[in-house]
Image (spheres, rainbow, N blue to C red):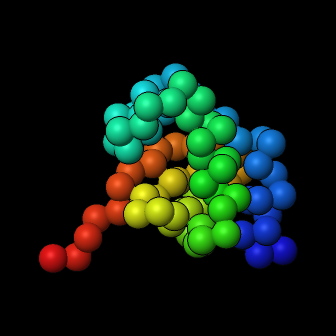
């Protein structure tokens, strides 16, 4: 099974920590209390590009990158995509 299908198939397992929630909200300037639900929506969107590198999945979507641990399904962080100068 490829990483994209595996992550999307297990969206119900996604979670994060309190610190992770604050970090994601700060990094992306989100105005939502349900960061996990926001991430699930982004990961499930048609334009999300999901890759796996080692123990993490990286979801590149809407100019941001969401990092998810592939074993625990913990959303580690999310940040705005850096533009090449």
Q: Position of residue 78 (x, y in %)?
A: 45, 48
Q: Residue at x 51, y 54 (%)?
A: 66
Q: Residue at x 42, y 37 (%)?
A: 30
Residue 31 showing in the rendered view: yes
Q: Residue at x 77, y 75 (%)?
A: 2
Quick check: 28 above or below 57?
Answer: above
Quick check: 48 above or below 21?
Answer: below
Q: How many marks?
A: 0
Q: Position of residue 49 (x, y in %)?
A: 58, 72
Q: Is residue 11 left or right of residue 32?
A: right
Q: Residue at x 35, y 39 (%)?
A: 29
Figure quadrant of the N terminus: bottom right
Quick check: 62 above or below 71?
Answer: below
Comparing 45 with 53, the one in front is 45
Q: Is residue 77 left or right of residue 56?
A: left
Residue 50 showing in the rendered view: no
Comparing 71 with 40, the one in front is 40
Q: Give the quarter of the image for residue 6.
A: bottom right
Q: Position of residue 48 (x, y in %)?
A: 60, 67
Comparing 44 with 79, the one in front is 44
Figure quadrant of the C terminus: bottom left
The residue positioned farthest toward the left in the image shown: 85
Q: Position of residue 22 (x, y in %)?
A: 43, 28
Q: Is residue 14 left or right of residue 52?
A: right
């Amino acid at each position: 099974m490829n990483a994209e299908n595996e992550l999307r198939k297990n969206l119900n397992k996604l979670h994060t920590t309190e610190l992770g929630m604050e970090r994601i909200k700060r990094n992306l300037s989100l105005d939502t209390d349900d960061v996990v639900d926001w991430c699930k929506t982004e990961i499930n969107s048609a334009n999300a590009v999901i890759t796996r590198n080692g123990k993490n999945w990286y979801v590149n979507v809407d100019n941001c990158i969401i990092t998810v641990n592939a074993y625990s399904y913990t959303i580690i962080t999310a940040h705005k995509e850096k533009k090449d100068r």
